[in-house]
Image: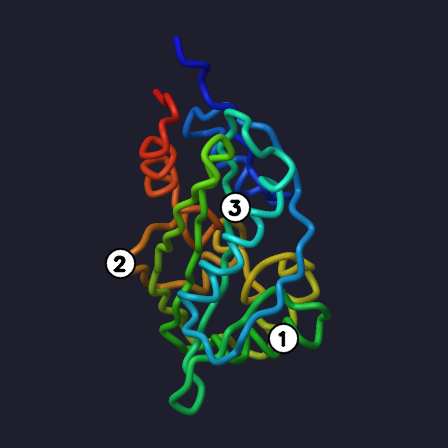
Amino acid sequence: MTEPFRIILASASPRRHALLREAGVEFEIVESCVEEDFDPSLAPEAVACELAARKALHVASGLSGQRVLVIGADTIVAVDVAGAARILGKPESEVEAAEMLRMLSSSRHRVITGVSVVDCSRGSHETAFERTWVTMRVLTPNEVEGYVASGEWRGKAGGYAIQENADKFVTQLEEGGFDNVVGLPVERTLSMLRAQGALLA
């Protein structure tokens, strides 16, 4: 009988951990400490996929030949500014968080999560993305200031957490799901794991 795959999530994100556990997946956590720099000329979808693959491949590099599937994921926010896509990662300061929120106020922007699954036993990998269009209402200066003061923006792409208090700013989601905005498109991830041979409920 073929040994079942171990599954490793290459992410320190507690939100991704929770989403995968809620889906009934047994997995280990190994944080991938890679640089998240990217070519700004790339489309946002390509950036999310590149960063997800980079994370998964980094963790998988030490597991060559083992029956292990490594999941890498990266979420970015992209908003059109002057006709061009501006990619927003995780703000590094209160000033940057406020700037991002003002940029997203009254916008219809994209939240894109790239997902990469590496089969360490074969050295193969698959990468895909899910995109959710998020419509955000106008935010008042007091709302921006209050949200930044709450600290909820820390570690969140685009400077907001829809699964926490920022849901009151959002009026509509289109195309992708809520879980994708949180940080992991669960059904897409499960489908990718099954395609690589994982035995899931």
Q: Which residue is mark 1?
A: 98
Q: Residue at label 3?
A: 72
Q: Name the amino acid, label 1.
A: Ala
Q: Quadrant of residue 91?
A: bottom right
Secondary structure at badge 1 equals helix
Query: In this view of the protein, which residue sits in the foreground, 114 or 156?
Result: 114
Query: Picture coordinates of residue 135 (x, y %)?
Result: 36, 68
Mark 3 or 1, which is nearer the eye? 3
Q: From the viewer's perspective, is 180 left or right of 15? A: left
Q: Is residue 119 left or right of residue 135?
A: right
For the point 26% across and 58% down, the residue is: 175
- Quarter in which the C terminus is drawn: top left
**Marked residue nearer the N-terminal end (2 or 3):** 3
Q: Which mark is residue 175?
A: 2
Question: Are the residues at dot 3 and dot 1 in contact (C-beta closer than 8 Å)?
Answer: no
Q: Nearer the viewer, mark 1 or mark 2?
A: 2
Identify the residue at image location x=41%, y=78%: 106
Which numbered disc, 1 or 2, marks the residue that appears first in the sequence?
1
Measured in 3D between alpha carbons, the distance from the residue under mark 1 to the one under mark 2, in whole angstroms, is 27 Å
| Callout 2 secondary element | strand
In the rendered view, would you say 136 is above or below 51? below
